[in-house]
Amino acid sequence: MTATLTFLGAAGTVTGSQHLLDDGSHRILLDCGLFQGLKVLRERNWAPPRANPATLDAVLLSHAHIDHSGYLPRLARAGFEGPVFCTGGTADLLRVLLPDAAHLQEEEAEWNNRHATSKHDPALPLFTTEDADRVLARVKPIAFDTTFAPTPGVEARFINSGHILGAGLIECRIGGRLVVFSGDLGRYGVPIMRDPDPVAEADVLLVESTYGDRLHTPDDHRDKLAEAVSRAADTKGWLLIPAFAVGRAQEVLYDLRELERARRVPALPVYLDSPMAIQATAIYASHPEEHDRELTDIVAEGQRPFATQRISLCRTVEASKRLNDTAGPGIIIAGSGMATGGRILHHLRRLLPERSTTVLFVGYQAAGTRGRLLRDGARTIKMLGQVVPVAARIMVSDAYSAHADRAEILRWLHGFTRPPSMTYVVHGEPSAASALRDAIAHELHWPATAAEDGQRVTV
Ligand SMILES: [Zn+2]
């Protein structure tokens, strides 16, 4: 029995994570992610599935991020009727993220039809809310460190990868070979999440390389956050923090609470203005088994780790709009993280022209996004049909990241007690993937190669 591995996405790029394991009698998909970013990548989401959905036995999902899970509704739409295995935390987050992704697709199609901008008539969504619901009904949560059979004859296990809530690296024993897939690796010694668990062995290893050519800046990200909060207090203005709803919003809340407790900043009113971030925060709080020691201690003392002293949750549009008539100083955390959409746009439109406003970016800002333009110093910015002048102070903290950097990936690889017979570097831009491959070869002397899109290899 010879097993093969085919790289169907996230090879030479960071999105569309999808790898097929096949031993002749079983076919297992590792991850089922959406391509994101450049148009040429996004167009790939519209092609027929590269793994025939009718022949798949199961999908194993490393974590809930859309570039790892967002193709599932499309797979269901194309006829996949098998189970989707993931951890409990991932299952909970999927119930928030997949319907939201479907809703965005439906909105975009509707907008295209109204403005007749699509060459397709009518423009259709990539997938619908029904597709998302259909695949959510197939999700089977499995506890960490528990061996299970995704299909008879194959064994698998999720191991904590420390990336976001529920994130696991995947061990899969198929065709007599042990394949380990890192999923996205988290960082060491950061708040909230535990360090990635070590793995002792693999016959074949797939390792991510998002930051394979970079090291994170060592500065304390709470310094920038404290500076931004203090400025808002001094100017009696608003601090706007565009943040991803899952992971980043919780990190920022946790850090704000720590700064308040240490009396490094005054306790300003904090508005979490994102229904998705509110749900994600509740999910983070409801999985104590994944909390790091600091978080566990806070909860054991009967405290709420993500609740600042004066926090308010804006669930409804009305609650969000009421902020328009509320005087600063205060802090608004809202999506989207790159200011490409979401409630943050309305706050930016209103508050960017004010000198008293502070905007703090806490995540990667991709080329072409409003977030990138602002951090690059744009003096005007187009949004919601207006040209908005920028008088606000724009600040950036580059220290927040949910991905291990090159040194941290290597630290995790050093946990192996015997070298894999082959290591495939995935989930990185070509320069990052080849840098990590070289580091693995020089530092560990393991055979390693950057996976190529569509490449099939024997495991
Ligand atoms: Zn991820």
Image (cartoon, rainbow, N blue to C red):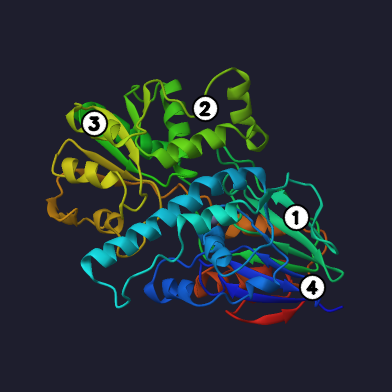
Q: Amino acid at mark 1?
A: Gly
Q: Earlier in the sequence, mark 2 or mark 3?
A: 2
- Label 4 and label 1: CA atoms lie apart by 15 Å
Q: Which residue is mark 3?
A: 323
Q: Is residue 137 left or right of residue 131?
A: right
Q: Nearer the viewer, mark 4 or mark 2?
A: 2
Residue pictured at 60% horizontal, 29% vertical: 294
Q: Nearer the viewer, mark 4 or mark 1?
A: 4
For the N terminus, the image quarter is bottom right
In percent of width and height, residue 271 lies at: 34, 31
Q: Earlier in the sequence, mark 4 or mark 1?
A: 1
Q: Which residue is mark 4?
A: 421
Residue pictured at 79% horizontal, 47% vertical: 146
Secondary-structure class at tag 4? loop
Q: Amino acid at mark 3?
A: Leu
Q: Earlier in the sequence, mark 3 or mark 1?
A: 3
Tell me: residue 182, above or below residue 50: above
